[in-house]
Image (cartoon, rainbow, N blue to C red):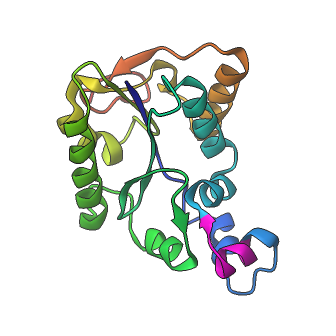
Amino acid sequence: MKVFLLSPASLTGVRAGQLLAARSRFALARRLRAEGLTLEEAFCFLSSLYFRGKLAYARRFRTDEKAPIFVIAPGQGLMPPETPCTIDSMRRFRRVRVSTACRPYREALDAHARELAARLDEDSQVILLGSIASGKYIDVLAPIFGRRLMAPRAFIGIGDMSRGSLMFRAVASGVELDYMPLPGRISRHGQLL
C-alpha cells in the first residue's frame, strides 16, 4: 500500500489572515464562519499551487481509491483532506507552530503516525509530500516509519512553488516521480544531515 502524507498549508500568511478575519466578505470566508469547510478547501485556499499540487498528485498516484491520504494538521496529527473544519479549528491550527520544539504539534503527529504504522505492512510506502530540508516532519516520522518513509527525489534543492508545479506536471503526464527513503533530513544539496 502507498500512503501519502501532505504537509500543511501555512496559517501565518496573508491568505490565512483574509480567510480568518471576521470582516472578510468573500464566499469562502463566509462559508467557513457559517457552516465550515473541509480541511482540503481551507488549505487549498491558503496555499493555492503547492497544496493543490500535493493533493492532485496523491490522488493520481495512490495505489487504489481506498489508499489513505492524510494532511498533517498542526496540533491534531494526521487528518483526511475531507475532515470538516470550523473557524475555531482553523484558529487552533494557527496557534500551533509546525516545529518539533512545539509539544502539541510533535505529540499529535507522533501519536497518529504510530497508529498508522501499526496498521501498515512492511512493504507499504509512506510518501511525504512536504519539506525534506528541515526536521519538522522527518524528525518525527522517520523513527516511526523507518525505511518505509519516502519522498520524491526531485524535491531536493527546490522550493514550495517549484514542488507544486513539479507535481502538477507529473499528474498531467501520468508519470510518477522517483522516490528515495528518508532516514533523516536532506539538505538543499542532497546531503543527509
Specify start and end residues of the magenta stretch as a single range. Answer: 29-37
Q: Is residue 53 magenta-colored?
A: no
Residue at point 49%, 52% (across, down)? 8
Please tell me whether residue 45 is drawn above or below residue 95 in the rendered image: above
Foreground of the two, 190 or 116: 116
Residue 148 in the image: x percent, y percent? 28, 25
Tell me where residue 174 sits by quadrant: top right
Residue drawn at x 35%, y 29% as measured from the top left: 186
Left or right: residue 113 versus residue 151 is left
Q: Which of 63 and 179 is in front in this view?
A: 63
Asked if residue 89 lies left or right of residue 27, the reply is left
The reply, left or right, for residue 20 in relation to residue 189 is: right
Residue 82 picture location, percent across and down: 55, 54
Q: In which quarter of the image is residue 141?
A: top left
**Vertical comparison of 131 with 175: above or below:** below
Q: Where is residue 160 in the image (x, y as percent from the top left)?
A: 58, 40
Q: Residue furthest front?
A: 66
